[in-house]
Image (tube, coloured by chain):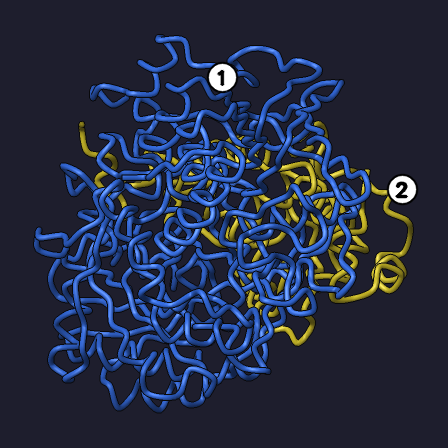
Amino acid sequence: MKRRTLLAVGLGAGTLLALAGGTLALLRPGLSGGRLTPAGREVFAAVARAVLDGLLPADEVAREQAVQAHLARLDATIAGMPPALQAEIDELATLLASAPGRLALTGLSSAWPQAGVAEVQAMLQRLRTSSLSLRQQVYHALRNLTNGAYFADASTWPAIGYPGPRPV
Amino acid sequence: MSSQPDPIQAGLERGWKVLGGPHGALPASISCDVAIVGSGAGAGITADLLSAAGLSVVLIEEGPLRSSRDFNQIEAEAYPTLYQDSANRQTADKAISILQGRCVGGSTTVNWTSSFRTPSDTLQYWRERFELPGLTDDALSPWFLQAEQRLSIGPWLVPPNANNDRLRLGAARLGISAAAIPRNVKACWNLGSCGMGCPVNAKQSMLVTTIPAALDRGATLLVQTRAERLEIDGEAVRAVVCVPVAINGGVSGPGTTRVQARHIVVAGGAVNSPALLLRSKAPDPHDRLGRRTFLHPVVASTAIFAEPIEGWQGAPQTIYSDHFLGVAPIDGPIGYKLEAPPLHPVQSSISLAGFGADMTRAMKDFPRTQAVLALLRDGFHEQSPGGRVALRSDGSPLLDYPLTDFIFEGARRALLSMAEIQFAAGALSVTPMHEMAAPTHSWAEARQAIGALPMKRYLTRVLSAHVMGGCGMAGRPELGVTQPDGRHWQLKNLSIHDGSLFPTSIGANPQLSIYGLVNMLASGLARELGGKSVALA
């Protein structure tokens, strides 16, 4: 598995590995066989609850169902990407799923399943306006993947007034 | 699924020779007169002319063969099947997102149909700076005319959709010239889903014009087949070595296919064509290969109107303004062309900034959202040398394109121009596509806010839908990769026939520039190799 692509940009790979407190090989993988692992799902579920806050259903049970459906679409989105991009997403999810990686990259102190929406949103805003390229890249990657998978589904269109395809 | 007749399915039933993916296993080797890498604008024109001259042609396309029955106007299906990197192609630092086609027909299958001849001042710059005296308006005019006739390029007489109309209206109220965009369509339904493939075969892409013509003459099309490298022997290319790939671009099987040919035409599009030459270790004595790759970096501005805009509906791109290309010399501060983009949920939600409450507000306003974009004309100034194509460790291309202060200076002017036009058209609010921008409610407020925005990568959202250059044409080998006749300067039987030929960006949507220039080059090649004069129309 090539794990240098994302790391080669912004911070040096060595710097980040030092920050992450170990080698990536010891971490839980974020992606396996092109699909999110349970650890990867925890990351993207917390990100989805924060990014899509206001669009996801208000009811807690319905919201969780929507998040699970979103994660399934995210798997499909990732599976459609070429191997080099899948490797980058794996690297990102693997780093973020580990406590040292999460702390070093995002500063988020709570573990993903425990992190509240406001806490994750504050973290996203820090990444977005960070002076470090790598953190800005992480922000855009998380948000683009989330929006790309979420709005791909027809069930999300009525809420934004999009009628979908016209019959031909 | 479209209920319209599907000319591609009909052709397959007639016995077209298509292999790869679901169409049949690739053979270990094939021989032909000419191997063409790619099936987009340059490859399609070339295949049509060379097959008409009686030459046996093999086209090698990395993407799948999809046609009107598959084109269901759904982003989630179109992007993974029809676009490079599943519509997630980015520059090396991820500061620019690039939309580029990857399917039979290439970007012509998914473009928004805008059809402009190469601007005169662009050609003049090429003549003067790249020693290409033959590229005059008069010399190219007949080649453009034939392409226009063949591809039904002409004025679009249907009123613009609301999204384009606000660009027209705002420009008119400010006294800024704007005009209608010629389109390559026949009996267009005005659906608005051009970017997901035309479900009614109105768009006269390579998929429904030149490629079927070549296949009807017996050409072979290999799909889901990646040209991995050229087999180079001294000054000659002997063959193209190919591998089968899955829809996501991953290698899908063992073994290779060797396509042996007298002549090779590389037309995989900018970024990909130079990458193939790099993987092949093609001679590059003057360090030109992959350099000067241009993107028309795009910045955009969104506006909310009181009335519905419904930017997903109707022909996506029908009004343009070249006013800001003409306010300074071509080699001065960067100029920009204004157009409107189509708006669909996936691309729009990614392009609109923010998350949570901000994004919810923006997406609830989606039907009343209007957008204008500015294509920055890169490559005409020493501080705009473009990007450079390199290879990842797996051999896939990676474009390093630094966004310089020179580009950002123009980007700020463009954001100002667009906001002024949108307010003049009656916008309630305008938001530049920038991570630190908030909605502004008057031109005065927008002017101040945009003036204060930090113009930096990642904060300023930058996109591209036009990749150009990297195998630049020039009158001397020191200045470029290809000769004025399209042949590689060092490899005798290799031609480059795509947008990677351009020595700078075009300053307009590039498809007709590729059709016209390649029409001229491929007609010459057909005469040399086939001994026959043939014409596109």
Above or below for B184 versus B285: above
Q: Is residue A54 visible?
A: no
Residue at x 71%, y 23% (from the top left corner): B258
Task: Answer above or below: position of B302 versus B315.
Answer: below
- Residue drawn at point x = 47 percent, y = 84 percent: B331
In this rendering, position of residue B325 left or right of residue B153: right
Instruction: Tell me where residue B484 appears, x and y as whole percent.
Output: 54, 59
* Identity of the residue drawn at 59% across and 69% down: B386
Q: Give the chain letter at badge 2.
A: A
* Disc 2: CA contacts within 10 A as few (<14), some (14-19) or many (>=20): few
Name the chain letter of the residue that bears numbered label 1. B
Kind of residue at disc 1: Val
Chain B colour is: blue
Q: Is residue B453 above or below residue A113?
A: below
**Element class at badge 2:** helix
Instruction: Find disc 1 in the rendering and name its residue.
Output: B18
Which chain is yellow in the picture? A
Few, some or many residues within 10 Å of mark 1 (<14, 14–19, 20+): many
Please give the name of the residue rendered at 64% of the width and 20% of the height, measured from the top-left corner: B31
Closer to us: B50 or B151:
B50
Determine which quarter of the picture holds residue B483: bottom right
**Disc number lying in front (2 or 1):** 1
Quadrant containing the C terminus of chain A in the rendered view: top left
Q: Quadrant of residue B533?
A: top left
From mark 2 to mark 1, how far is it between C-alphas?
A: 47 Å
Horizontal placement of A121 versus B193: left or right? right
Q: Position of residue B38 (x, y in %)?
A: 53, 37
Q: For residue A26, which numbered disc appears in the image?
A: 2
Pointer 2 with pointer 1, Cβ within 8 A: no
| Viewer-side residue, B537 vs B433 | B537
